[in-house]
Amino acid sequence: MQNKTFYIKTMGCQMNEYDSDFLTQSLISSGFSRVDNLKYADIILINTCTVRAKPEQKAYSLLGRMSELKQENSGLIIGVIGCLAQQKGHELMKRFPQLDFVMGPRELGRIKEILRRIDTNGEKFVATHLEPAPPQPVICQGYFDGKVTGYLSIMEGCNNFCSYCIVPYVRGREISRSPEEIMIEAKNLISEGIKEITLLGQNVNSYRWEGVEKWNFVSLLREITKLDGLLRLRFTTSHPKDLSEQLIHCFGDLDKLCPHIHLPFQAGANLVLKRMKRGYTREKYIDLIDKLRTVRPDIGITSDVMVGFPGESEQDFDMTLNLIKRVQFDSLFSFKYSDRKGTLAAKMGDKVDEADKSSRLSALQNLQKQISLKKNRALEGKRLEVLVEGYSKRGGQISGRTGSNKVVNFIGDNSYITNLVTVTIKHGFLNSLHGELFFENNSLTG
């Protein structure tokens, strides 16, 4: 199948982006060529998410449009990969007969084998076993050329089984990668020019490796930050119940560890948190935030929150708003609860009306917009260190992020890209900052 072209559409989370990078490197290293327009592709891969209803519906809509391409080109190979493929499996093949295969996240290492068998025998595949360990990384020299930031998966799966969450069923149980394998991949990213690495896992705090030496997440962080050429290290996502004192202190001890944490709280009422099976209380969550800010006062804190979980009362929702006011998040990913088939919450009664969910979400988002804008405007006049990632979507500017993960746009040329620079913040907007280079202190570091 060499010389075939492929197109990947990635939907959903950072883990999906990492998986798409893995698949792309696997195929390029085997003689395939990537194209940016699906009309010119011999193979189309759709990397899906099913954590919430909205990305699932988007995937169905895209698959519906694929039937037209298949009619025009009967030799076109179409595959669905990722969490939706894992969850729906054979059901997807029946609903969309133009599909050639579906493949879950734990089966990605089989991509070349499956494509070869489809091309040779015209077979159709459903590959959704959850037993395989995450596949070995593929080194494709030059793949990250021109990129400043990169992802590195350190573990796969989740053991928490929150009552609303489909992840343990579509990503499997927790399995950590060996520290040796992680370090090899990190060194390769750095050798390719990556300056900032984000470690990925459904719950990175749970990283464990029992080898000749025992490793946990803190020991892994400390080892990676020793690597020459790495300017910044981030990680996501953390679970509050597993956020240790040792990990909190890393934000004060490790210079390369960015002062930012994404720490989902999901709801502000203890009764709702208990039904969600989150394993912590609102008081415990607030205590963790206070400890993080004691160790690193300038830390950026972002989170996930949902409204309308089964049984959520107006009083429960008010408790969520109260927590948001108390914590003062830098930003929030907020969404309405939606049933995920197979989860405990999907079977719960006392569902919240859709109109009430929409009203609550609007109120929550309006509150957070006020907080985000206030926090960003408070940075006006301050000098912040920014890692320049490339050109801004606005013409004539370059763009980067602060350690606390805020986007900063400012005037500059491409000589600053991949470097840490000091920027004076002139204006704080809702979703970004605008600044000017502070030249006195700007020797290029990359």
Image (cartoon, grey):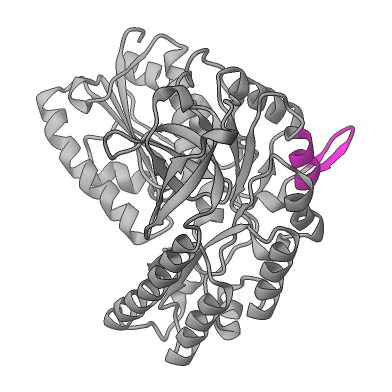
Residue that appears at 62% across and 46% down: 235
Is residue 212 magenta-colored? yes
- Tell me: residue 243, above or below residue 186: below
- Location of residue 231 (image quadrant): top right
Query: Among all residues in the image, which is located at the extreme right?
Result: 212
Q: Which residues are magenta?
A: 209-223
Q: Nearer the viewer, residue 331 or 340?
A: 331
**Viewer can see residue 151:** no
Is residue 211 magenta-colored? yes
Q: How many marks?
A: 0
Residue 75 position within the rendered picture, expressed as x and y whole percent measured from the top left: 20, 19
Q: Nearer the viewer, residue 226 or 398?
A: 398
Q: Along the horizontal axis of the image, is 39 left or right of 204?
A: left
Residue 173 position within the rendered picture, expressed as x and y whole percent measured from the top left: 63, 50
Residue that appears at 56% across and 32% down: 442
- Tell me: residue 358, above or below residue 172: below
Residue that appears at 66% across and 24% down: 229
Q: Nearer the viewer, residue 352 or 191?
A: 191
Query: Among all residues in the image, which is located at the extreme front?
Result: 440
**Viewer can see residue 265:** yes
Query: Among all residues in the image, which is located at the extreme bottom?
Result: 315
Assign the C terminus to one quadrant of the image: top right
Assign the N terminus to one quadrant of the image: top left
Residue 217 position within the rendered picture, expressed as x and y whole percent measured from the top left: 75, 46
Residue 29 position within the rendered picture, expressed as x and y whole percent measured from the top left: 47, 12
